[in-house]
Amino acid sequence: MSANERLILGIESSCDETAAAIVAGGRRILSSVVASQTEIHRKYGGVVPELASREHLRQIVPVVREALEQAHVSLTDLDAVAVTHGPGLVGALLVGVTYGKVLALALGKPLIGVNHLEGHVHAVFLEARAAGRDPRLPAVCLIVSGGHTILYNVTRKHGNGSEQFSYARIGGTRDDAAGEAYDKVARMLALGYPGGPIIDRLAVHGNAQAVRFNEPKMSGNVFDFSFSGIKTAVLYHLRRNLQLEPEISERRRSLERGERSADALRALSGAATLDLIASFQRAVVDNLVSRTLAAAERHAARDILVSGGVAANSELRRTFEAEAGRREIDVYFPSRALSTDNAAMIAAAGYARFVAGERADSTLNAEANLPLA
Ligand code: KG4
Ligand code: ZN
């Protein structure tokens, strides 16, 4: 392997995925292993922090071992260990941080602390470049997941000859993250957990114009988001339309029986429910797209980057692509596998910091609210 093919082990444990990956030269993924805890948190309809930490503890060693095996790499081949140290659930982060620290120390290898949000930005670059495309900077980046909905202006960091970026926060959600709204609405409608993928699948069968949701009125920063209003609007809609109740109970029973496929749930959803789902999704997508485009215009962005779990959404991708097609702008999304939490993006972000000479030491700590900018 050549010098620019430095091998970074990435470790991610900020929420409910235990992940490890080996990335060569910051862009060639040799392995990316993700152990998801969805099954464990499903019955609670959201991530339970204590259970997440416990599961990370069980998974971290086998997941790292699997990543090394799949990449045909041994621990001694590594050039550095990069680990997410925030933002996220503190107990969950601590598992990865402690493990990463001990591993780097035992191996005598450099340790790099990575911000999870920067990882999501790098997920976009990682794949675009592997495909021979290079997003143009400055770019506006929307990170949209179950924990975050945030807009950054991304520029190149000058002066150190490495591939590092600078970030300026343009706006973000004032209440729920978009993915959280998907999950909460799915819970109200008894569509299972996580809500995003199932709503994505069912929405195509409904009329997105059927139910009107008011645009949230935002004072102050026009690039901020709000999704709690739409969640409440869905709740009120259900209270006004009690005829939808029996269907919800039917779906709840179906979920309890373990029948949670899109086909099974669709068979138990009438036109009015499918219309509500489609309208909800349309409102969320319009909100995300319109603010991101406005921010891109204001900041003279040359391209747009979209990352995070909700970036996997088909309607969001379609709408962004259609809107960007009308402008001189490209929109970059990671593949679905790299949109949701993974460690390849952490290794890629860590690589840029490694090349720039950054090193963490034994004081590296988990920081629940670690900001990117
Ligand atoms: O990035 P991620 O794996 O974890 C967090 O950092 O939160 O994102 C998970 C979130 C969940 O809220 C899930 O419902 C949402 O992303 N999600 C989707 C889709 N796939 C996952 N939301 C909308 N459409 C999807 N296809
Ligand atoms: Zn994430």
Image: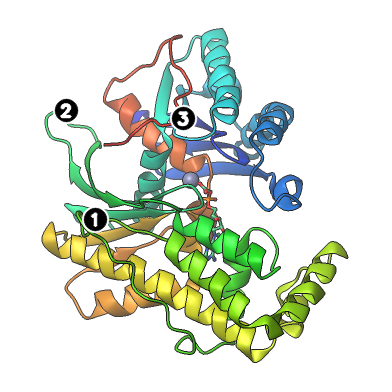
Front residue of 264 and 337: 264
- Which residue is rendered at x = 44% and y = 89% of the image? 209
Which secondary structure lies at badge 2?
loop
On the image, the x and y values in percent for residue 198 come to: 63, 69
Quarter of the displayed picture in which ligand 1 can be seen: bottom right
The extreme front residue here reads: 240
Specify the quadrant that holds the C terminus.
Answer: top left
Amino acid at circle 3: Ala
Q: Which residue is mark 2?
A: 160
Q: Under 8 Å from ligand 2: the CB of mark 2?
A: no
Residue 207: percent from the left, percent from the top?
Answer: 51, 90
Query: Residue 175: in sight, yes or no?
Result: yes
Q: Residue 140: which disc? A: 1
Q: Which labelled disc corresponds to residue 368?
A: 3
Task: Using a 10 Å C-alpha cutoff, classify the residue at mark 2 as few (fewer than 14 neighbours), some (14 to 19) or many (20 or more).
Answer: few
Nearer the observer: mark 3 or 2; the answer is: 3
